[in-house]
Image (cartoon, grey):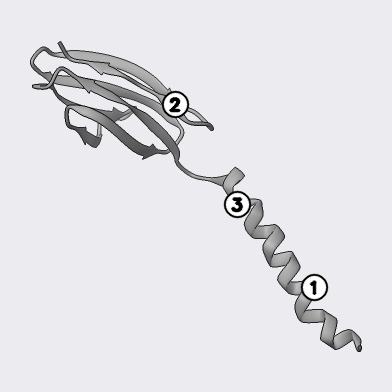
């Protein structure tokens, strides 16, 4: 076996190590929860006030960049709930009733 035959395997191994480290550098985190009641309408807005998601009643799952957000209920009542998207999964239940 020559050194040149080991080179592709070595580069492949380095590539696998680099790919394995990517999840720790993820740019978005999973936010899950439920929106109640059945007639609810809600949106998620970022710190600048820009709408980043519209939520329907029931269970939801989103990917949001780490930061500050608000869940805004539009119906049947108007409410706001602040939350943080962290570097790990977060559960945010939104009650618009």
Q: Which residue is mark 3?
A: 22
Of residues 70 and 32, the one nearer the viewer is 32
**From the viewer's perspective, is residue 59 above or below residue 17?**
above
| Dot 1 crowding, Cα within 10 Å, few <14, some 14–19, many 20+ | few
Q: Indicate the secondary structure of the residue bearing disc 1.
A: helix
Q: Quadrant of residue 83?
A: top left
Q: Which residue is mark 1?
A: 10
Indicate the position of residue 40 as horizontal and vertical percent values: 12, 22
**From the viewer's perspective, is residue 57 above or below residue 64?**
above
Q: Which of the two discs, 3 and 2, labels the residue nearer the N terminus?
A: 3
- Please indicate whether residue 56 sits to the left or right of residue 30 in the image: left
**From the viewer's perspective, is residue 20 above or below residue 76?**
below
Indicate the position of residue 23 as horizontal and vertical percent values: 58, 47
- Tell me if residue 49 can be seen: no
Indicate the position of residue 2 as horizontal and vertical percent values: 91, 89
For image coordinates 52% across by 31% down, the residue present is 88
Of residues 24 and 37, the one nearer the viewer is 37
For image coordinates 13% across by 13% down, the residue present is 78
Q: Which residue is mark 2?
A: 90
Q: Quadrant of residue 17?
A: bottom right
């Amino acid at each position: 076996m020559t050194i040149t035959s080991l080179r592709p395997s070595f580069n492949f191994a380095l590539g696998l190590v680099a790919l394995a480290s990517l999840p720790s550098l993820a740019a978005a985190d999973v936010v899950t929860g439920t929106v109640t009641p059945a007639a609810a309408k809600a949106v998620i807005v970022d710190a600048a006030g820009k709408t980043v998601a519209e939520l329907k009643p029931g269970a939801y799952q989103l990917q949001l960049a780490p930061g500050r957000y608000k869940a805004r209920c539009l119906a049947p009542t108007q409410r706001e709930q602040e939350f943080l998207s962290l570097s790990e999964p977060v559960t945010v239940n939104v009650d618009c009733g």
